[in-house]
């Protein structure tokens, strides 16, 4: 019972960290704010966070709403629930990587709350690719299948965050990611294993062809490894922004793969 209670505490803490969903205070009593163990619940938390978007897909699909209109509302629902947290990380990362002459200048730019040209372009591309990909493949699935596919993508993209986080040291000592602590090795294994298994089960239930599933997993691996290598070269580590950017880039890659293969 204690382990089950601790796991659900980790789920609640992960939901609070990754979204703007209110979480009862009892899950934080005696908690030091670290997420080293809680990251094991990121994939499941991602599914819970994506539920409003999935319900939107199911309801609008059931009434045969325009696929483009549905796709825009899905992405809007995701951004609303998360408070555009991951989009902010993507924009800051793009500004830092694009405008920073060296590691120090890149980190300084990423701390600036103002958005620059690189960040604006990254957001336009992220929203545009996700919307167009959703509009491309949702009509080819049942309404329920489309909603379930969104949940699978959410599980994978949150597992990707843990993978990126665990592979690099903190780029700065006073950042959000550094304060949250490094993912524990067992928790990282659970996050990656559960993320892959949940995504496989959900993709199967959604009716997505096996080829599309394989391509989406290939896109997931390629996105995380490639971006982590770039972050290592640019910053020598991770930040809260790069962790959020990993979620966005993985989601773009997986949805793009599904649009190409279904």
Image: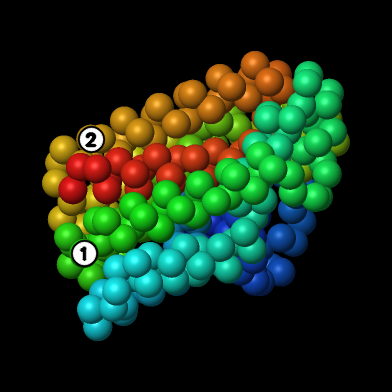
Q: Is residue 35 left or right of residue 219?
A: right
- The reply to whether residue 149 is visible in this rendering is yes
**Residue furthest bottom in the image:** 63
Q: State the image coordinates of residue 32 (x, y, percent, origin top left).
A: 78, 49
Q: Residue at x 39, y 29 (%)?
A: 221
Front-most of residues 234 and 202: 234
1 or 2: mark nearer the eye: 1
Q: Is residue 207 left or right of residue 228?
A: left
Question: How busy is the neighbourhood of tag 1: few (under 14 within 10 Å), some, or many (20 plus)?
Answer: some
In the rendered image, the vertical position of residue 138 relative to residue 99, given as above or below? below
Q: Which residue is mark 1?
A: 139
Q: Residue at x 58, y 43 (%)?
A: 122
In the rendered image, the vertical position of residue 242 relative to residue 123, given as above or below? above
Front-most of residues 96 and 176: 96
Q: State the image coordinates of residue 126 (x, y, percent, origin top left).
A: 50, 48
Q: State the image coordinates of residue 258 (x, y, percent, origin top left).
A: 27, 46
- The reply to whether residue 5 is visible in this rendering is no
What's the coloring here? rainbow
Q: Which residue is mark 2?
A: 214
Q: Residue at x 55, y 31 (%)?
A: 164
Q: Is residue 262 left or right of residue 229?
A: left
In the rendered image, the vertical position of residue 201 relative to residue 239, given as above or below? below
Task: Label 1: state its secondary structure.
Answer: helix
Front-most of residues 151 and 116: 116
Q: State the image coordinates of residue 91 (x, y, percent, origin top left).
A: 66, 45
In the rendered image, the vertical position of residue 145 relative to residue 262, given as above or below? below
Front-most of residues 91 and 205: 91
Q: Quadrant of residue 67?
A: bottom left
Q: Residue at x 40, y 58 (%)?
A: 131
């Amino acid at each position: 019972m204690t382990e089950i209670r601790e796991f659900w505490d980790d789920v609640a803490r992960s939901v609070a960290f990754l979204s703007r969903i209110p979480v009862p205070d009892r899950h934080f009593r005696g908690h030091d704010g670290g997420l080293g163990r809680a990251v094991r619940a990121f994939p499941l938390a991602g599914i819970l966070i994506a539920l409003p978007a999935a319900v939107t897909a199911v309801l609008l699909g059931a009434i045969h709403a325009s696929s483009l209109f549905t796709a825009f509302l899905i992405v809007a629902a995701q951004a609303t629930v998360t408070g555009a947290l991951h989009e902010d990380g993507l924009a800051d990362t793009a500004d830092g990587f694009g405008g920073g002459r060296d590691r120090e200048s890149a980190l300084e730019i990423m701390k600036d709350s103002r958005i620059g040209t690189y960040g604006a372009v990254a957001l336009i591309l992220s929203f545009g690719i996700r919307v167009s990909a959703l509009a491309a493949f949702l009509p080819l699935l049942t309404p329920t299948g489309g909603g379930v596919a969104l949940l699978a993508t959410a599980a994978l993209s949150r597992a990707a965050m843990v993978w990126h986080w665990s592979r690099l040291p903190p780029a700065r000592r006073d950042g959000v990611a550094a304060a949250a602590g490094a993912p524990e090795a067992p928790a990282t294994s659970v996050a990656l294993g559960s993320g892959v298994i949940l995504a496989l089960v959900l993709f199967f239930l959604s009716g997505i062809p096996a080829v599309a599933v394989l391509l989406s997993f290939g896109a997931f691996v390629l996105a995380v490894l490639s971006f982590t290598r770039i972050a290592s070269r640019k910053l020598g580590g991770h930040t809260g922004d790069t962790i959020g950017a990993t979620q966005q880039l993985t989601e773009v890659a997986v949805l793009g793969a599904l649009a190409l293969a279904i």
